[in-house]
Amino acid sequence: TLAWMMALYANCSDPRDGEACRECDSCLNIIKAIQNGTDGRSVIEKPVSERGIDAIRALESQARYHCRDRYWWFIIDEVHNLTKPAFDAALRLWEKPPQQARFILCTTAPEALPRTVLSRSFIFNLEKIPADVTAKKLLWPICKREKFDIGKDTLLQIAEKVSGHPRDALNLLTQWIAASEGGVEPEDIPKLLSSLEASAPYEAILHYCKSIVHGKTNKALYVLNYMTRHEYFIDRVIEQMQQILYRWVHAEHLADVRYEDDMMEINPVVPKEPKAKRQCIIEMGQVLRLCLDAQDRIKQYRCNNRAVLEQLAIEITGITAAWDAR
């Protein structure tokens, strides 16, 4: 979406106050393409499925034609999925592009891109959208426009469930509206959210983390297998596990820190005896280092991140199995 907005502004013939006019011929053509889900006159989006060298050659051929608008814009989605021959061919094109051609490379795995590509690109890192911003700027205006009566606290809970992913927030909002037509009491909100399909990946990640924290290797592997079968984004597991570990350390060293959410169900039983407690804190650090190492391995071998997470579960449960016993 951001790539299309960049193309809209750059090709606008009459930009106003840093915004596209949305009235000129170029703007109207791009807006129509966005609404219809098709390519525009000067904006071409390459889907994930086209990742071979033939797709790059076709793109290069088209880029050499004259463009009616200011620039050709070629948007390549999930560019890290290109094959090596495709990258080699694309690199030659990107080093010496036709005068009117501009390329936007979209990826969720920049670490998987060749260094030769990264060194020749302007890089814009997009951070996850905070839950309060998602609720206020995305969900609330939609509810107001469509006249859906949903409280702001409920919208915030929906936004918190999706970990900064606006598209998931929209899906969850849609399911919420369908599931709550008969009216929902405030105390039933957490239960309803947990039952919705869009929040299932988040719940599965929590179950995985809870299993390895309590030393239950078999259960952790079962949940991991479940996430893989349902094509969940299991690379979020490491990030979630790190967040949980940071909270434990805060809870042990900062008495005034309190967290009121699903993660508190995963807290380990930290012994009160000073020596055992100190040992437990040290082992938390070891678990955190294992998470960081696993994160590095996933970046290096993205095609086999399930194997990395299976190994992580076995390594961590070897440490955490003793926590409850103490």
Image (cartoon, rainbow, N blue to C red):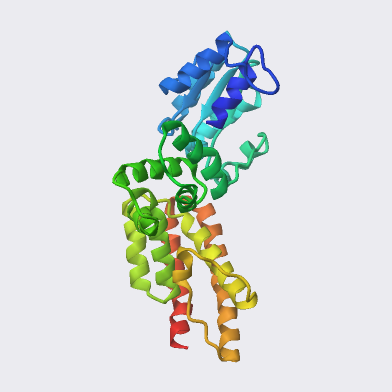
Q: Is residue 88 left or right of residue 320?
A: right
Give the farthest residue toward the right.
17
Residue at 69%, 23% in the rendered image = 18
Q: Quadrant of residue 117?
A: top right
For image coordinates 34% across by 63% down, the residue present is 223
Q: Is residue 68 left or right of residue 170?
A: right
- Where does the image place residue 29, in percent across and percent down from the top left? 51, 13
Instruction: State the residue lying farthest toward the left.
Output: 182
The relative height of residue 307 versus residue 316 in the rendered view (above or below) is above
* Residue at 45% in and 61% down: 308
Query: From this viewpoint, is residue 262 visible?
Result: yes
Mark yes or no: residue 61 visible: no
Q: Position of residue 37 (x, y in %)?
A: 42, 23
Residue 141, image x, y percentages: 50, 35
Say which quarter of the image contains residue 321. Answer: bottom left
Along the viewing direction, whichever of 50 and 149 lies nearer the viewer? 149
